[in-house]
């Protein structure tokens, strides 16, 4: 349940944005992919990430319908090259192979532009 407490998720997301900016990644005006595998707390987490992304200056968010995209699908979308809207990366909400749920795991990872 730690992942739902306080600013646990927000701190992680902000640290990723800080690192991207410090590394010269064009976050402002860029395209970010945000999705998850539909497990417990994904909808809430995705909304937090999207709000923080726009606050950080991200110009476009690509998100699966109802926030749903598998990890391989999200990676493929991140690698998408089209009409100058190439994503600089994406957040994937997934506990991978671990059980998900309020008493189990919630996972989040950031994938850079190569998916």
Image (cartoon, rainbow, N blue to C red):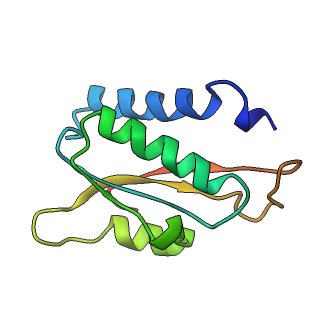
Drawn side of residue 33 relative to residue 106, left or right = left
Q: Is residue 8 above or below residue 34?
A: above
The residue under the point 35% across, 53% down is 89
Q: Residue extending furthest right?
A: 103
Drawn side of residue 44 relative to residue 78, left or right = right
Where residue 14 sits: x, y (%)? 45, 29
Where residue 96 sits: x, y (%)? 70, 62
The residue under the point 58% across, 47% down is 45
Where residue 104 sits: x, y (%)? 86, 51
Q: Is residue 115 above or below residue 108?
A: below
Q: Quadrant of the C terminus?
A: bottom left
Q: Quadrant of the N terminus?
A: top right
Q: How many dots with numbers?
A: 0
The residue under the point 19% across, 41% down is 26
Q: Is residue 15 above or below residue 71?
A: above
Drawn side of residue 113 relative to residue 14, left or right = left
Where residue 12 sits: x, y (%)? 54, 32
Q: Residue extending furthest left?
A: 83
Identify which residue, 24 or 90, lies in the foreground: 90
The residue under the point 44% across, 67% down is 75
Q: Is residue 85 above or below residue 54?
A: below
When asked about the image quadrant of residue 21, the answer is top left
Drawn side of residue 84 relative to residue 90, left or right = left
When asked about the image quadrant of residue 63, the answer is bottom left
């Amino acid at each position: 349940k730690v992942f739902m407490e306080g600013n646990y998720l927000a701190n992680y997301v902000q640290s990723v944005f800080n690192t991207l900016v410090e590394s010269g990644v064009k976050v402002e005006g860029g395209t970010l992919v945000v999705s998850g595998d539909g497990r417990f707390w994904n909808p809430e987490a995705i909304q937090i990430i999207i709000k923080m992304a726009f606050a950080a200056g991200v110009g476009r968010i690509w998100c699966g319908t109802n926030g749903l995209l598998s990890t391989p699908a999200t990676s493929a979308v991140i690698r998408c090259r089209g009409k100058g809207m190439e994503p600089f990366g994406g957040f994937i909400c997934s506990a991978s192979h671990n059980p998900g749920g309020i008493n189990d795991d919630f996972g989040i990872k950031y994938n850079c532009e190569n998916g």
